[in-house]
Image: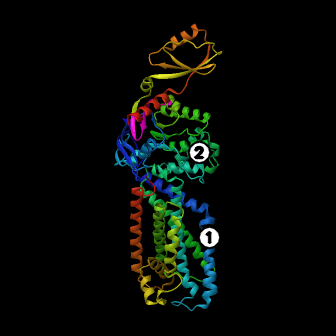
Amino acid sequence: MITRTGFYPNMIALQTLLRKETLRFLRIWTQTLLPPAITMSLYFLIFGKFIGSQIRQIDGYAYIQYIVPGLVMMSIMTNAYANTASSFFLTKFNKSIDEMLVSPMSNLITLLGFTLGGTLRGFLVGVIVMIISLLFTRLPVHHPFIVVVMAILAAMVFSLGGLINGIYAKRFDDISFIPTFVLTPLTYLGGVFYSIQQLPPLWRTLSMFNPILDMVDTFRYGLLDVSDLNIYLGFSLVIILCVIMFFWAWALLCKGVGIKV
Amino acid sequence: MNALSVKNLTKVYSNGLAALKGINLEVAEGDFFALLGQNGAGKSTTIGIICSLVNKTAGKVMVFGYDTDTELAQAKSLIGVVPQEMNFSLFENISQILINQAGYYGIPQKIAVNRMEVYLKEMGIWEMHNQPAFRLSGGMKRRLMIARALMNEPKLLILDEPTAGVDIELRHTLWRFLSKLNQQGTTIILTTHYLEEAEQLCKNVAIIDHGEIIEHANMKVLINRLNVQTLIFDIEKPLIQPPTLNEYRYRFIDDTTMEIEIHRGQSINHLFHLLNEQNIQVNSMRNKTNRLEELFMHLIKENKDHS
């Protein structure tokens, strides 16, 4: 009997899922694209213009210029995470995940479809926030390749994180717990608003265990050519994190955790 | 070739509930097969495992010869499923739901768009195709799920209570449609609580009770095993004295309605003869319950007594 399986049908399935995910966040743009644009405009205005003008330069840049890369990265991370966490959880909640489970598309395609959807939203929000930042300050781009690759990698790591959260989540509360109690503190303590050189030794050492610091620092290096850490180490760490989370999420989907009984 | 072959299928849920206790089931290609059972008997679990929505504990499932353990994608590409409960996003457009489903099966969009039109027209909801799904009525949602299950033109269509909660007209439309589909070569497995539906449509039947198959037979053969059926007679006028119907057991429901039991081997002609002799004019006659229903209840009771 002839069956429709293999590479080509799986590519159509991936295209379908990615289109669905993209249309989803574009359709509800007032909930997905507009809020980060407004929030970051306020950050630029208050922390950058009003308060930032009172703060001395860091590494030769005005305070607003110094915090733009961190705020762009923060937007990328939170939006990539929120996208997959909420989309996957809602798909589970309304049982439309069954549409994928009964079909011959592989778990790898499901994983890629959701992850790339979240990555795309994170990247798009990053571009929007960066464009908005240009209304407030001038922004040099010293290493465009590093900027783009780190933005994509960070979006991917957080998109995978959101997916894992969505897989485990049983209630709506479960998809807001990690962002509120884990990611937000780590992001704010991840060098978005300051250089870790300004921290006391204990806090500087503790910050080294925060992977978000590496993402922010490497991204900032790509834009401003200034860095507190070794960017090669930062890249390696993010890639390793990405690989670990990829296989973790894949294993969960293959086992059917949270989606099959 | 069997469209479906299930061997020693077992499912024990994490709470310890043994939903399936090593069931065996075979459905021939081209069959219209009824899987019957009470609520919680294991029907939906069986279907869930076949469609990969539920993880099995043990056993083997083969779909058109493809083993779901080693050739899952091939097996799934041949199945279409209409679940018992609604399982689509209410905020998506109807056309998008169908095109996406086809996409998950690896069907290019151009083909999917054509099929969508065909099946939505077949189901009578084509005019709603640009509407979000939440605008559909309950019956329309059911039809949408049937259209969605057909998008990959499955060789094996599994319907888990497709007519639950739908009006009589739609139920009859679906029956006609499913019969046509079956005549065109699609193997159909149906679970239903309307045993009249199963008796009318299905060629073969399995009855599942407490996770075990207690009957697996040809529908006609099974119906013929019915020992007794109860007929209701509407008579023209009240009788002055009770009739003499010899070996036929009867009782009056009201003055002009009689319930008469006919055992296997007893003749309805003879019964009419006796009624005629006593000038009892019969206006109409009907089965008290569906024949399959009587048999079903009998088998379930027997299984309960036995266990």
Report helix, strand or loop for mark 1: helix
Q: Is residue B100 magenta?
A: no
Per the image, the residue denoted by label 2 is: B141
The numbered disc on residue A35 is 1
* Residue drawn at x 59%, y 53% as measured from the top left: B92
Please name the amino acid that badge 1 sits on: Pro
Q: Residue furthest bottom?
A: A56
Please name the amino acid that badge 2 sits on: Lys
Residues tagged by mark 1 and mark 2 found on one chain of the structure = no
Which part of the image, by quadrant, shows the N terminus of chain B?
top left
Image location (x, y in percent) of residue A49: 63, 85
Asked whether residue B108 is in view, the answer is: no
How many marks are shown on the rendered structure?
2
Image location (x, y in percent) of residue B97: 56, 50
Please tell me how crowded label 1 is: few (under 14), some (14-19), or many (20+) other residues with Cα within 10 Å: few
Check the residue under mark 2 and report the chain it is in: B
- Work out whether A221 lies above or below B290: below
Image location (x, y in percent) of residue A69: 53, 79
Asked whether residue B161 is in view, the answer is: yes
Please tell me how crowded label 2 is: few (under 14), some (14-19), or many (20+) other residues with Cα within 10 Å: many
Q: Residue furthest top?
A: B277
* Residue drawn at x 47%, y 39% as measured from the top left: B157
On screen, residue A77 versus residue B4, left or right, reads right
- Work out whether A98 lies above or below A237: above
Report helix, strand or loop for mark 2: helix
> How was this image coloured?
rainbow
Q: Are marks 1 and 2 in contact (CB under 8 Å)?
A: no
Which part of the image, by quadrant, shows the C terminus of chain B?
top left
Dominant SS of magenta comes to: strand
In three-dimensional space, the C-alpha distance between marks 1 and 2, rounded to whole angstroms, equals 34 Å
Q: Which residues are magenta?
A: B201-214
